[in-house]
Amino acid sequence: MSLSDTSNADTPKLFSPLTQRDLTLSNRIVISPMCQHAADDGRATDWHLVHLGKFALGGAGLVFTESTAVSPHGRIGFADLGLWRDDQIAPLKRVVDFVQAQGVPIGVQLAHAGRKAGSQPLWDGGRAFTRDQLRFQDGSHWRRLGPSALSAGPGWSVPDALQSDEIATVVEQFGAATRRAQAAGFDAIELHFGHGYLIASFLSPISNQRTDGYGGDLRGRMRLACEVAQRVRAGWPDTKPLFCRISAVDGAEGGWSVDDSAALARELSRCGVDVIDVSSGGLTEETRKLTVPRGLGFQVDFARRIKQEAGVTTQAVGMIVDGNQAEQILQSGAADLIAIAREALNDPYWPRRAREDLLLPSDYSTWPKRHGIWLAKRDEQMGDILRERRDAVARQRHQTGHDKAGIDKGSN
Ligand SMILES: Cc1cc2nc3c(=O)[nH]c(=O)nc-3n(C[C@H](O)[C@H](O)[C@H](O)COP(=O)(O)O)c2cc1C
């Protein structure tokens, strides 16, 4: 594995390149995976082109697709992206080509939702499908799968405990999706091993009560994660990086701990995973769950511990809201990359604004030429006027107390 950190004292770390294997990111800002429920039987649509394309225009260092199912049974909702069939490659390639044409690399997050498959989009309530609703459009049965016959919480049906031959099938589904990701031209893969989905449910002693080689002690519970990582690495070019998102703690009493995560990160690194993307929670919706309190950068300390204890490259995510905060996280050594989700929805140009937060001059050479040339002219012609207007608005907001507004305590 080659990791080169080419930051120097004059450039904020956030805007320093980072090389993973043969891929160089021009900055440390990563657009985090975000489910859109906009695919057509797993195929990307115009929505994905615009949704992901605008982040490329916005100057991110790397853009990830949403959770992309390796099997129809592994979808979170009906309209997730998928790479379980070959006809899903071309529509995704169209998105990949557009993002790369802007000079921005793009990765795909491969996932199997496991016992949390089949739920409504948040705008329809976000509830788990009932047994009756848990059917594909052609009426066939949509199976929830897990390590053991234990439901994800109230409202979730009991999953089918995977037989050992079915476990081998899941590993192969990740392998086949990897081949398709390569055919679509992706620059990176992220494995989704967090948020209580299939692989996460094998990791936790709460959801995994198997007595065979895929359960029991930590090594047994990590076995499926390692087999998937090895299978994907074997089918993915050596030149391209492999990321893995984990939940540092799973949010259940007596469940998966940060120490377990550090052990997993070490194992995954041995299997050829290059970056550990550190999220948390999502295993269970039971009332005994231990939620990680939300606040600015609430998962950063998990990334720090995993980086220190496992010696891996980490990506921090969760309520990272401006350039100064992001830079401080990188400077503190907690993480090498910063992922943003909701802030990017609010402002796809977040990376460009983060430059201003860090008092860097606008660099229009990094904008798409069709926009940058006009913005440079705009600065020449009306830079002073715009600055005066902005200062006047800021003074007015301050006088009327508008800038006391707090940060929304949303959840992911
Ligand atoms: C609309 C939306 C969809 C999401 N879908 C995914 C997903 O597909 N895979 C995933 O790992 N996380 C998903 N997340 C979680 C985000 O990637 C991110 O970890 C979380 O929102 C915290 O970051 P933030 O505070 O910058 O939003 C989603 C978040 C949002 C807001």
Image: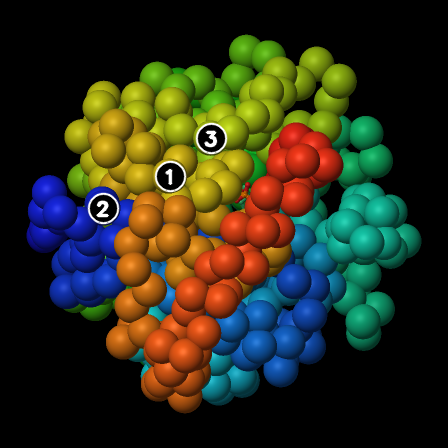
Say the numbered circle drawn on residue 153. none
The image shows residue 45 at horizontal and vertical percentages of 62, 80
Q: Within 8 Å: ligand 1 and the Cβ of disc 2? A: no
Disc 2 secondary structure class:
loop
Q: Residue at x 20, y 64 (%)?
A: 23
> What is the distance, in whole Å, between disc 1 and disc 2 at their CAs?
10 Å
> What is the distance, in whole Å, between disc 2 and disc 3 at their CAs?
19 Å
Q: Pointers 2 and 3 in contact (CB under 8 A)?
A: no
Q: Which residue is drawn at 38% across and 53% down?
A: 356
Q: Pointers 1 and 2 in contact (CB under 8 A)?
A: no
Q: Which amino acid does label 1 sit on?
A: Asn
Instruction: Name the residue beneath numbered marker 2.
Output: 12
Q: Residue at x 51, y 72 (%)?
A: 54
Question: Mark 1 packing: few (<14 Cα in 10 Å), some, or many (20+)?
Answer: some
The part of the image, by quadrant, that contains residue 102 is bottom left
Which image quarter holds the C terminus?
Answer: top right
Disc 3 secondary structure class:
loop
Against 47, is 269 above or below?
above
Q: Which comes before the other along the chain, label 2 or label 3? A: 2
Judge depth for marks 1 and 3 and give the one in front.
Answer: 1
The image shows residue 398 at horizontal and vertical percentages of 63, 36
141 or 48, which is in the foreground?
A: 48
Against 191, is 47 above or below?
below
Against 320, is 143 above or below?
below
Instruction: Name the residue beneath numbered marker 3.
Output: 297
> What is the distance, in whole Å, between disc 1 and disc 3 at their CAs?
12 Å
Disc 1 secondary structure class:
helix
Q: Which comes before the other along the chain, label 1 or label 3? A: 3
Instruction: Name the residue beneath numbered marker 1.
Output: 324
Q: Which amino acid does label 2 sit on?
A: Pro
Question: Mark 3 packing: few (<14 Cα in 10 Å), some, or many (20+)?
Answer: some
